[in-house]
Image (cartoon, rainbow, N blue to C red):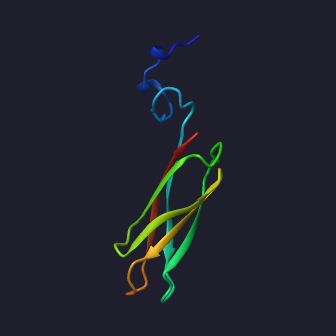
């Protein structure tokens, strides 16, 4: 039997998510999702599909836009995906770029 103190993080062959005790196995996923606004459109919905589903929809996700005239909001979540709404704050050139996101949970 291996005790927790017997194996240090430096000996692992994978990158664990280190969290408080009692949370069980925690999964972290992240990525970039491209977007492009059509002319005069004020909002977009972007579907983020996870490589591996979470146990349920009670995970944390955050997203941000790489364009200063846009911001992201989480519209909905399921175990296997999330919908991020991208809102344009002013009408100017048609913004395009990427949503940067990270999700963590069981």
Q: Position of residue 59 (x, y in %)?
A: 55, 46
The residue lying at 42 percent from left, 80 percent from top is 95
In the picture, the quarter occupied by the N terminus is: top right
Q: Residue furthest left?
A: 68
Q: Nearer the viewer, residue 72 or 18?
A: 72
The residue lying at 59 percent from left, 60 percent from top is 76
Q: Is residue 28 above or below residue 38?
A: above
* Left or right relative to 48: residue 10: left
Q: Position of residue 57 (x, y in %)?
A: 62, 49
Q: Is residue 74 above or below residue 17?
A: below
The residue lying at 53 percent from left, 31 percent from top is 23
How many numbered discs sit on the rendered protein? 0
Q: Position of residue 44 (x, y in %)?
A: 53, 75
Q: Is residue 58 above or below residue 37?
A: above
In the picture, the quarter occupied by the C terminus is: top right
Q: Residue furthest top?
A: 1
Q: Position of residue 6 (x, y in %)?
A: 47, 14
Q: Quadrant of residue 90?
A: bottom left
């Amino acid at each position: 039997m291996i005790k927790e103190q017997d194996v240090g993080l430096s000996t692992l062959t994978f990158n664990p998510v280190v969290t408080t005790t009692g949370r069980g196995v925690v999964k972290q996923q992240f990525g970039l999702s491209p977007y492009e606004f059509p002319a005069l459109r004020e909002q977009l919905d972007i579907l983020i599909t996870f490589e591996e589903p979470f146990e349920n929809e009670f995970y944390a996700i955050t997203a941000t836009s790489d364009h200063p005239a846009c911001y992201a909001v989480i519209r909905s979540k399921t175990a296997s995906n999330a919908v991020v709404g991208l809102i344009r704050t002013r009408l100017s050139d048609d913004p395009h770029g990427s949503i940067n996101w990270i999700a963590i949970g069981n």
